[in-house]
Image (cartoon, helix red, strand yellow):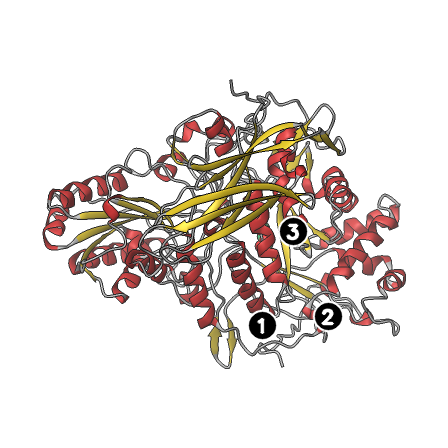
Amino acid sequence: MKCVDRVWIVLGFLFCSLGSAGGSLRLAEDNIDEIVRQMSPREKAMLLVGCESLVSKDSLTVYVPGAAGYTKAFPQYGIPSTVMADGPVGVRIFPIKVDGKRHYCTCFPSSTLLASTWDTQLVETQAGAMGEEAAVYDVDVILTPGINIMRNPLCGRNFEYFSEDPVLSGLMGAAMVNGVQSRGIGTSLKHFVANNQQVNKLNNDSRIPVKALREIYLKGFEICLQHSNPWTVMSSYNKIGGILTQSNAELLRTVLREEWGYDGLVVSDWYGKRNSPEQLEGGTNLLMPGEKAQLEEIEAGIKSGALSMEVIDDAVKHVLDYVVKTNAFRKDIHAALPDLEQHATLSRSVAGQGMVLLKNDSCVLPLKGIKNISLFGATAYHSIAGGGGSSNVNKSHIVDISTGLEQVGFVLDRSLKDLYTKYNAYQEALLVDPKATDWERLSYRRYVYPEMDLMPNKTLVGEQAKSNDMAVVVIGRGSTEESDRKVHDDFNLSDSEIYMIDKVCEEFHARNKKVVVLLNIGGVVETASWKNKPDAILSVWFPGQECGHAVADVLTGTVNPSGKLPMTFPVRYSDIPSSKNYPTVGETLSGENFDYTSYEEGVWVGYRYFTTADKAVSYPFGYGLSYTEFLYSEPSVKKEKGRWVAKIKVTNVGAAEGHESVQVYVGAENRASENPLRELKAFGKTKLLKPGESEILTMNFTDYDLAHFDEPSSSWVLEKGLYKVSFGASCEDIRSVRDIKVKKQQRWGVNRVLNPVVPVQTMTID
Ligand code: BGC
């Protein structure tokens, strides 16, 4: 018996009511073609348009409050409705009442934190737990993973994405897909492709030079599909080559289906106001969330002959191929309720493993001999579990950083805590609708409060320094799907935040007491101007609902941080090549960076630029400290059974047990100027190594992985010659290098597609 009583909806929208005439043919895995032949054009059209909200009253329709959308039921063919729900950090549905009690979903750490673990196995484990929750709550597909490239730190959705690098993004995405799908629940690989800004995201034309499109933006999707088979792929909102991705046959038919062999369901992102026949012709199979007008457009297209029956039937077949995989169809039996306690423990453990230790002077962390802490920062007492928008999970609680620290025995300065508690209560009263329910206050109505200004009180920080053992300062930054971030008071710290760090460091250091800064952030913030002040800096990212517990685990040393950055922290925002072609929120309302964005930086995204141009950064891609140290030895790279196999021995030479992740970068010795110095090709992570213990990591890549895209011949080309294989603790901390020899040139031709509507002047590095 399923735990959650299915809620049958009595009144459906007219267009969701399907009637139930019909014969005895019932959908089965092996009769899809026959069903397609039997369905009327209207029924087919109805199947291709999803349903957002209420659905009809029949035994094959299920309603899950808060889910993102449905496919419709056709009882006359035994076709059940199926349920799709967000998203990347857990199942997003309204908390469901069972036996008068509300049941929630687990809010896991954000994708950025997952990527920082560099541990695909761990990601699969989290994803498996997400899949279990979906199954229990009657959700058939979780709309995850988002694997768009972090082109620019201001993208409001970066926290939902993994990395600035396509290999890390693609493999993390595959781990997410494999983990969720191992529980019989589908995924949606999104947003295909180049959803890299939120400003005018519905219409922006991403003008990307084809080399960069192939090597950076499509590459993550290509890799993800090589290592997993998501039930669905979701197109993005933007245009590519001047055509909306949902209608873009070059993207969906030529690249996705023909070149990459994808055979699953292609769904549109959630937006109805598009030309429906064009979307189906372009290769979209299912229009989500679905509107009556779309149904009418499709029917009109069928009637007039503008929309071919071949296109319709192909799309219907893909929808039915998907339906037969779902729990809704298979009627699998699941546990009564998810094990939320166990999942909370998992969420806490994953969070600890993805936090990145950016600085740890004199080994101030893990904390020793500390009891009384001055905890500064509004976010310390009202911490951020995740980002806003569709990835918001309705969780039962969020453990604030203050609570997490208290629960492991630290004593927080009472007067400071009172001050922040009052300040936050004031902010809440100001910003949150008084009618909001408790669970809404933990999700849709949870805001990140602007930092309290400590400047007016001239004595407060000094008094804190006198009476406590140390200070912890928390900097909080929200991020949401609805908007991009700004440079001022967002990427750059605000005056209040800078003052807080300065003053706390000054007063505590004057008394020989330490200061630790915690960054409760979704993505990159400026660090170069202030990082020399505190003794330690830990990026805790958006760590999910167990935030405070996971922070306490790392600060006390229960967990040795092993996270490493999945993106570069530049010195200044303006150092990032794409900053020249990125919208400034509020100022860009038409034209460049709004109607279209020229990716003039080409492939010079993230570390590819900084390492090749030899430009200083604040913290490089792949960087992260540990409470122990690791020695790399015995590197080797050999060709075995058509693959390059890179091995390295990692030994824990410090005093604490810990994990280490190793990155394998490859670059040609005689590099063409349009190609980066070195690029990530593989990575691995050790088990928990005890002091003195070693492990040999084995990492693979292929010849094709080493090829670069050659626009004139529209092919991937691997030039013959010597290549340097670098084993790195980060992209700058290269511990060993081995040469490999490619004996002859190799080429893989692809279609000449997806050209930007006008040539893009691409940046070069001298
Ligand atoms: C988002 C998707 C999400 C969908 C359903 C869209 O606005 O872009 O990522 O899965 O809504 O909520």
In depth, the one of 219 and 687 nearer the eye is: 687
Q: Which residue is mark 3?
A: 227
Q: From the viewer's perspective, is the residue at label 2 or at label 3 nearer?
A: 3
Quadrant, the N terminus: bottom right
Q: Give, as a three-letter code, the residue at label 1.
A: Val
In depth, the one of 164 and 80 nearer the eye is: 164
* Circle 1 Cα neighbour tier, 10 Å, few/some/many (<14 / 14–19 / ≥20): some
Of the two numbered discs 2 and 1 on the same chain, state the one appearing first in sequence: 1
Q: State the CA–CA distance, disc 2 to disc 3.
A: 26 Å
Res. 460 in view: yes
Q: To which quarter of the image does residue 325 belong? A: bottom right
Residue 145 lies, in percent from the top left, at 58, 52
Q: Is residue 365 left or right of residue 577?
A: left
Q: Is 146 located above or below residue 764 in the figure?
A: below
**Badge 1 residue CB within 8 Å of ligand 1:** no
Q: Give, as a three-letter code, the residue at label 2.
A: Phe
Q: Residue furthest top?
A: 766
Q: Residue furthest front?
A: 634
* Circle 2 Cα neighbour tier, 10 Å, few/some/many (<14 / 14–19 / ≥20): many
Q: Give, as a three-letter code, the residue at label 3.
A: His
Q: Which residue is mark 1?
A: 136
Q: Which residue is mark 2?
A: 329
Q: Is 582 located above or below residue 518 in the figure?
A: above
Residue 85 lies, in percent from the top left, at 59, 60
